[in-house]
Amino acid sequence: PEIDALVKARGEAKTYKAITALMKASKDCTGAEVVISHCENLPGAIKLKQQILADLPVKNVEILPCRGLTSFYAMEKGLILGY
């Protein structure tokens, strides 16, 4: 499998806006439940949550710390998003 960059965004704020645009383009997020898992990056997870709530009609956004294998995939300061 390959990992491709879908969007090249410079800066944290532009990255979060690009993420919400990709979410919106991929499916109807109305009433969706979103989970953000962070690896030692609670401030980043909170900022992403705020952007999601501002841009999309989701039901709620839950933030959880990474544990076990997800920590390996996210790496330090990484975020994993499920919706």
Image (cartoon, grey):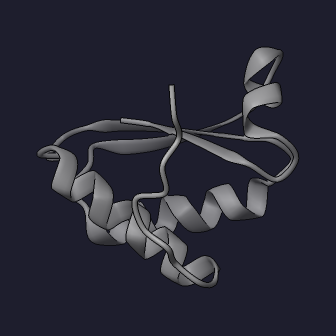
Q: Is residue 75 above or below residue 5?
A: above
8 and 39: which is toward the camera: 8
Q: Is residue 26 left or right of residue 13?
A: left
At x 83%, y 40%, the residue is 75
State the count of labels.
0
Please report the residue visible at 41 percent of the width from the left and 74 percent of the height from the top: 17
Q: Nearer the viewer, residue 5 or 75?
A: 5
- Compare residues 46 and 83 and report the one nearer the observer: 83
Q: Position of residue 59 (x, y in %)?
A: 27, 43
Residue drawn at x 50%, y 82% is: 14
Location of the C terminus by quadrant is top left
* Apparent side of residue 3 relative to residue 33 in the rendered image (left or right): right
Q: Residue furthest front?
A: 2
Q: Nearer the viewer, residue 58 or 38?
A: 38
Q: Residue at x 30, y 58 (%)?
A: 22
- Position of residue 8 relative to residue 56, above or below, is below
Q: Position of residue 79 (x, y in %)?
A: 66, 47
Measured as percent of width and height from the top left, residue 27 is found at 15, 43
Position of residue 65 measured from the top left corner of the image (x, y, whole percent): 76, 34
Up the image or down, 33 lies above or below 46; here it is above
As displayed, is residue 71 above or below residue 63?
above
- Looking at this view, name the residue that lies furthest to the top: 68
